[in-house]
Amino acid sequence: MNHRLERLARTVSRLLSPLFRSRRLRIVFCLLAAFLAFLFALDRLFPPPVPGRDSPKALLVVARDGTPLRAFPDQKHIWRHPVTLDQVSPRYLEALIRYEDRAFYWHPGINPLAILRAAWQWAWHGKIVSGGSTLTMQVARILEPMPRTVGGKFKQILRALQLEWRFSKAEILTLYINYAPMGGVLEGVEAASRAYLGKPSQRLSHAEAALLAVLPQAPSLYRPDRHPERARQARDKVIARMNGIWTKEDTADAFSEPPFSQTVREPLLAPLLAERLKKQAAGRIRIDTTIDAHIQQTVEMLLSDRIHGLPPRVSLAALVVDNASLEVRAYAGSADFADEQRFAHVDMVRASRSPGSTLKPFLYGLALDEGLIHSESLLADVPQSFSGYQPGNFQQSFHGPVSVSEALTKSLNVPAVEVLDRLEPAHFVALLRRGGMKLELPKGGEPNLSVILGGVGVSLEQLVGAYTALARQGLAGTPRYTSDAPMEERRMLSPGAAFIIRDILESGGPMGRALETGAGQRRGIAWKTGTSFGFRDAWSIGVSDRYTVGVWVGRPDGTPNPGFFGANVAAPLLVDIFDALEAFGPFSAASRIRPPEARQERICWPLGLRQSSTAPEHCHQVRLAWILNDTAPPTFPDRLRGGEARYPLQIDPVSQRRALPGCFDGPLATREIARWPAVLEPWLTADLRARALPPPWWPSCAGHATPESGLKIVGANHNEVLRRSATGAAPLIRLEIRGKTEGEVIWLVNGRNEGRRPARASFAYRLEQPGRYDITAMDDQGHYDRISLSVR
């Protein structure tokens, strides 16, 4: 490198040495050098006011196709949509240069011939007839407004020379197309094209290109939305000069095209997302988002239609994420950005709220991964107490024996708490955090069993990101709002667990498909609803192969909305959004690949083991289950009574009654039976009870304990029939418990929890409707009694 510089220096010295032999030439050269140095110093001391990095700028937030979502003006309240030359129609650039400055690409910033012509016309006519300004001079005046005087024109010429010295022709032209005045608060061809014509400047017709090329000459006079006829006349002047550049057919079409302009409006799509990104703009003048403008507009219309049927101050939020890229296609943080009564500026996509039951799929998925359950593990949906915590179901009714699949599809609370109790709340919260979902616990609080029923805070954004794991082989992700945002993925579930949970939510699992209970099976949508305590939040999350969609409904101030729950207000909107998404292409694949670690196996209740490894007499019910990693975990240990799930008993071979050597004379045979959990025995059907429960005792052994011993319902007889007249009052029964004097008793009518009462208190109940009533009394130790009544 040094060798080359030395050679260059010797060459320059050899060329200039003849000049320095003449004293006059040396003086001229020195004066010229001094003048150039003076000009260089002036250029550095007084640079042209070109917008720099620290200059206040207008900010434009656009969709993935360039459609403006929202524009934030600069300090002068100017709307500007920055573009590059290749983002503008060549027709516009042709019209601009042909009409404004034909010599643009060869002059040094000023056109001497044009200036002389303008000066001669001014001297001859006594007024300005034509301007001598080049496009570079116009850029100079745009960047630094100057008076229309001789001094102002001279300064404009100097600034134009400076611009040419500092910038390329393409850079100067880019400044013009972005800063040219276009009427009102609009600057630049893109802002004018979007505002007046409703399209990007890349798609301008010949006539539209001519109109926008002439508009900066008199922006107020030529505005097409206010003065369409003047705008047409000015446009036609430009078209007339395009002969030889455009074909005759193109110019003829341009002349015949009627002038058009829409009412100028501020772009306002995904306004809360735009505000959010603006805070992260860091001096940028344009933010390209991942939003699909058509999907965004559709979602906002659906929310706007839905909100009119909801009470005042109720808001809505929705988020649509593309599963493959995690890019957000629609973002609606509030129902109506113009309705302050509905907390328009509160972004409910980001707000931390109680998730209700929406965490249950992750609980069961993580329990699958931990080897605690399979899809048909036996759970108890009955009143239970977990160290004093007594959850109930949303409908205040119970179903008795249920599988994991049934518990998830019906969103039952007690089985979920039972599984969380086995998994442990702190471990569950830690696993969710590992998967990217950071739950917000009450200040100073520790994870407890209420976590699974909504006793934490989480945002719609977090939930949707987590639910994408069901379509991404267990990998959850952070929603991406710009294409340059990093791809942040974390393992939430194993591929097999994600597949199983999605299958359950979509179709009810293998048993659900057999019974045709899967609501989303035909559509290929796995969905879950949730309702927080006090009806404050209603949720619905849906997952298809292509999209994950989340919906929230509620009041941002946390006021309860009685009667608002996920299934009746959030789920219908979710369905509407998926219906609308079908117009943008299929959102579910024709087939889904099952991970090899997930497969179906027949298992048996009550033990929960494979049918192939269970004796027929111990297999009271056969269920088709998803198992993970070739593991079929057994039913959870009985919480109320110890011992093995299979236990031996002695019976009289003749009478088949249960007996013991101390109270029965004769030979006894040993039989092993499979025990159901104690809390589920009252819920077994008569046929199942005959198979599952131990046989009755031999009369002389009747004093030995049975699961029912200790409680007896009095006040009505089993299978009693009560009659009422058509006009008479409904029968009122009053029942009491014998055999227990301390603690509380749970009363259930047809599986519905009617509450706890002291053991000494009576239970009054009016039988309003004809039919059968199954009444059960149960304590926390698993003792129970049941009677059946009929009203006719």
Image (tube, helix red, strand yellow):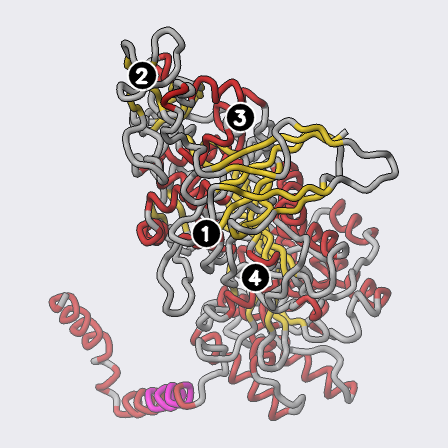
Residue 773 in the image: above or below residue 515: below
Q: Is residue 214 magenta?
A: no
Please state if 208 lies on the left or on the right of 334 as rendered: right
Dominant SS in magenta = helix
Which residue has dot 3 on it? 512
- Which residue occupies 31% across, 50% down? 427
Q: Amino acid at mark 2?
A: Phe
Say if mark 1 contacts mark 2, CB within 8 Å: no
The numbered mark, 1 or 2, whose residue comes first in the sequence reads: 2
Instruction: State whether residue 452 appears in this view.
Output: yes
User: What is the CA distance from the residue labelled 3 to the residue labelled 2?
Assistant: 48 Å
The numbered mark, 4 or 2, whose residue comes first in the sequence reads: 4
Q: Using a 10 Å C-alpha cutoff, classify the residue at mark 3 as few (fewer than 14 neighbours), some (14 to 19) or many (20 or more).
A: many
- Where does the magenta region start and end? 33-43
User: What is the CA distance from the residue labelled 4 to the residue labelled 2?
Assistant: 71 Å
The numbered mark, 4 or 1, whose residue comes first in the sequence reads: 4
User: What is the CA distance from the residue labelled 3 to the residue labelled 4?
Assistant: 34 Å
The numbered mark, 1 or 3, whose residue comes first in the sequence reads: 3
Q: Amino acid at mark 3?
A: Gly
- Which residue occupies 66% across, 47% down? 764
Q: Amino acid at mark 1?
A: Gly
Which picture quadrant has residue 634? top left
Q: Amino acid at mark 4?
A: Met
